[in-house]
Amino acid sequence: MSVELSVVVPVFNEEENLPELYRRLTAVLGTAASSWEILFVDDGSRDRSWEIIRGLAENDPRVRGLRFSRNFGHQMAFAAGLDHARGQAVVIMDADLQDPPELIPQLLAKHREGFEVVYAVRTARHGETFFKRLTAKLFYRLLARITSVQIPLDTGDFRLMGRRAVEAFRRLPERHRFTRGLVAWLGFPQTGVPYERAPRHAGTTKYPLRKMLRFAVDAITSFSHVPLQLATWLGFIVSGFAFFYILVVIALKFAGISWPGYTSIMAAILFLGGVQLVMVGLLGEYVGRIYDEVKHRPLYLVAEEAGSREQGSMRHTNR
């Protein structure tokens, strides 16, 4: 059964935020859309998140839940939510209440004006460290310089997608996913709505530095060949430096100037060895992604559903 609006929310250990998120969402959606649903995707939580989702679904037929068989990742949870959402428009957002549900009516208003994708633009990021704000700002500007896809600056995953965009997104098969980049790649009329990102309501971030770095690597390698081209450029630079150095050594030899060359030789060997290892590592990142793609494993497995579908089923998608 189709509804006007679906809200997809990935969940990973968010038991402290779910009741307040549900309260605020229902208060907003009741006036924003004629019919709606909330779809929680439990990404292998180890706390009481699934129990809360199941309880909400039992008490409110407009709430549905999917529970992964294990932790597949934040971006896979978005993919699962978009696969199962029934809305003519779909909002995707996080469960920590940094993305305010009260912005949804503005997103929906822009969609009704004819925009297929409406993304939320962060004008301020409250409750985040200076380091995180700085690195995020630098990362998105670097990404804009090295990719051909115009990914909007200062945006996260919080956005609304029309049904055409959702169906197009579902056709994308990537395993290493950068949702905001994939949505930008789709095209269609897109626009932004500014907002101030609030501090996390409760709990701790699920994106520590290690995951942020992995996410950044996925984003860059998914939308840019510049790291591979960098290997070529650096190879030419190092080769040019080596050729110039050879000419200098030959000139000094003919001038009768010579000295033991252990230090210079070792410096050259270590430098070239380091460059080669870096380049092999970059090539390995791309080869590893090719390997992951050709295996054709499902993006995720759903072990249990709550709400309008039968619980306890095992579902997957091969895309």
Image (cartoon, rainbow, N blue to C red):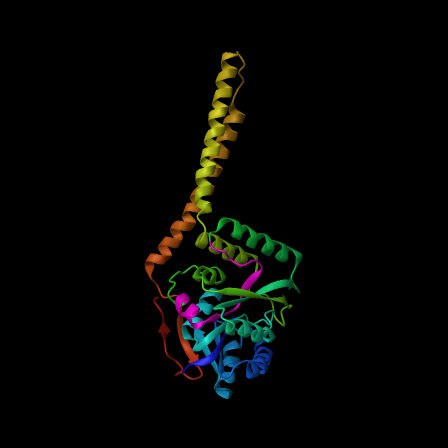
Q: Position of residue 69 (x, y in %)?
A: 42, 72
Q: Residue at x 33, y 57 (%)?
A: 294
| Quadrant of the image containing the N terminus | bottom left
Q: Residue furthest bottom?
A: 59
- Where on the picture, by quarter, is residue 88? bottom left
Q: Position of residue 188 (x, y in %)?
A: 45, 64
Q: Magenta residues?
A: 149-169
Q: Residue furthest front?
A: 113
Q: Nearer the viewer, residue 273 or 285?
A: 285
Q: Position of residue 27 (x, y in %)?
A: 59, 82
Q: How many marks?
A: 0
| Quadrant of the image containing the C terminus | bottom left
Examine the structure image and report whether residue 156 is included in the region drawn in magenta.
Answer: yes
- Is residue 292 placed above or below 74 in the rendered structure? above
Examine the structure image and report whether residue 166 is included in the region drawn in magenta.
Answer: yes
- Where on the picture, by quarter, is residue 130? bottom right
The answer to whether residue 260 shows anywhere in this view is yes
- Is residue 136 placed above or below 39 in the rendered structure? above
Q: Position of residue 306 (x, y in %)?
A: 44, 81
The answer to whether residue 9 shows anywhere in this view is no
